[in-house]
Amino acid sequence: MTTEEFKNKVIPFSRKLYPMLFRILGNEEETRDALQDLMVKLWNKRKELDECTNQSAYIVTMARNYSFDLLKKKRPERIQEADRYKILNLEADEVSQETKEKFECVHRAICNLPEKYRAVLQLRDIDGFSFEEIKEITGDEVPNIRVILSRARQKVKEEVEKIYDYDKTKQFV
């Protein structure tokens, strides 16, 4: 792979990878450093990348694994704890406590999903990947991805409704 091919094929992925890396690492500076390191790693593996039949899946998988490796080295805590969303770190006057609690409830519901459901939901709704890109990453067909995404969203909705329906019934007792 030439320098021009690398610039045209790999570098544009950084825009897609940034949200995923930020979600995993939870720190803007660490995310930028990780993305830069990842691009160097991809440049060093350009021959493997050139031979790869599914380059986007290879790049996304490499980015995900690299960010988890960084997380493991840095913190002994569980990886899911680093999976916090930006809203939880906002100042109290920017977001109400009720909003933070609702957001945490949705976050827990997503974390409790089966791995395949959680992965597809995060790739589509949080990281903003298209169905075609998710197809390349997971190897599943688009109709199957749509079904998984629909079921994942439904499960999250049901879990959140259980909590809030329970809260409403407690108030009338």
Image (cartoon, rainbow, N blue to C red):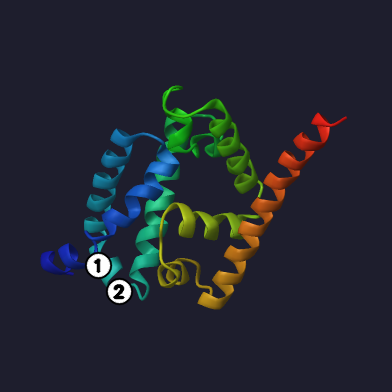
Q: Which residue is mark 1?
A: 47
User: Which disc, if any, is residue 51?
Assistant: 2
Residue 149 makes an appearance in the image: yes
Q: Which of the 4 image quadrants contains residue 169?
A: top right
| In-image side of 152 versus 164 (left or right) | left
Q: CA distance from mark 2 to mark 1?
A: 6 Å
**Image quadrant where one finds the C terminus:** top right
- Between 131 and 79, the one lying in front of the other is 131
Q: Is residue 74 above or below residue 144?
A: above
Mark 1 closeness class: few <14, some 14–19, many ≥20 residues within 10 Å = few
Residue 141 makes an appearance in the image: no
The residue at 43%/50% (across/down) is 65
The residue at 30%/42% (across/down) is 34
For the image, the number of numbered tags is 2
Image coords of residue 109 (percent x, y): 64, 45
- Between 69 and 35, the one lying in front of the other is 35
| In-image side of 120 versus 160 (left or right) | left
Q: What kind of element bears circle 1?
A: helix
The residue at 24%/67% (across/down) is 47
**Image quadrant where one finds the N terminus:** bottom left
**Amino acid carrying mark 2 in the image:** Glu
The residue at 11%/67% (across/down) is 4
Q: Which of the 4 image quadrants contains residue 91?
A: top left
Q: What kind of element bears circle 2?
A: helix
**Amino acid carrying mark 1 in the image:** Lys
Q: Are marks 2 and 1 in contact (CB under 8 Å)?
A: yes
